[in-house]
Amino acid sequence: MSASRRRTRDAVYTRAASFACVAIVLTACASRPTPIAYRPITVDAHCTQREEDGFREDARLSVSNNHVNAIDWQLWVGQRGTCRFALADFRQTREKPQVELTARDGSGCKLLVWQEPGRVTLAHADCEQRCTAGIYDEAWPVLFDPASGGCAVIR
């Protein structure tokens, strides 16, 4: 192989390696959301509210250092139906990074509790059987304000 061919080959390899390094750096810098830092959840809250469209909720949540002491949550989707969740029907199966409770009846229904800056969220997953038929997709999580112990206000 001639010297000029070797230089051309080396230049191609160098350029390819440079492009690969740039691609790796750009991929690493891609705008991925920063994970929320883990903090133990301690909250004693009661949220009762009614929306203009008839949606309302009455939720009580008590958590101490990621251990759930109380959940009593009922929500209404207008006049069409309700969903109901009570701690007695669940057992806590996870404490970190979020709190998770699984239904004792083996249905796969789960309650999840996590904390973000300024609010604690109580959500459900795979719990259609705990709601009136046809409303589950409109049964939203409840957001608590850990500072006031009431409902969180989303701005």
Image: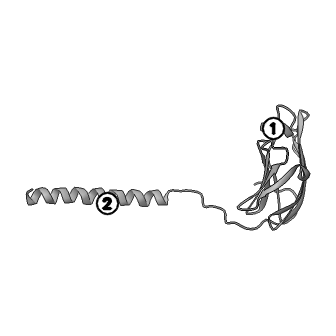
Q: Nearer the viewer, residue 43 or 97?
A: 97
Which SS class for mark 2? helix
Q: Is residue 12 left or right of residue 112?
A: left
Residue visible at 76% across and 42% down in the picture: 126
Q: Which numbered disc, 1 or 2, marks the residue that appears first in the sequence? A: 2
Q: How many marks?
A: 2
Residue visible at 73% across and 59% down in the picture: 98
Crowdedness near tag 2: few (<14), some (14–19) or many (≥20) residues, C-alpha within 10 Å? few
Q: Amino acid at mark 1?
A: Glu
Q: Amino acid at mark 2?
A: Ser
Q: Nearer the viewer, residue 79 or 66?
A: 66
Real-space Cα separation, disc 1 to disc 2, in angstroms: 53 Å
Q: Which mark is residue 138?
A: none
Q: Is residue 23 left or right of residue 130?
A: left
Crowdedness near tag 1: few (<14), some (14–19) or many (≥20) residues, C-alpha within 10 Å? some
Residue visible at 12% across and 55% down in the picture: 5
Relative image position of residue 131 (x, y in whole percent): 86, 38
Q: Is residue 75 above or below residue 18?
A: above
Q: Is residue 2 left or right of residue 116?
A: left
Q: Which mark is residue 128?
A: 1
Query: What residue is pinned by disc 2?
Result: 18
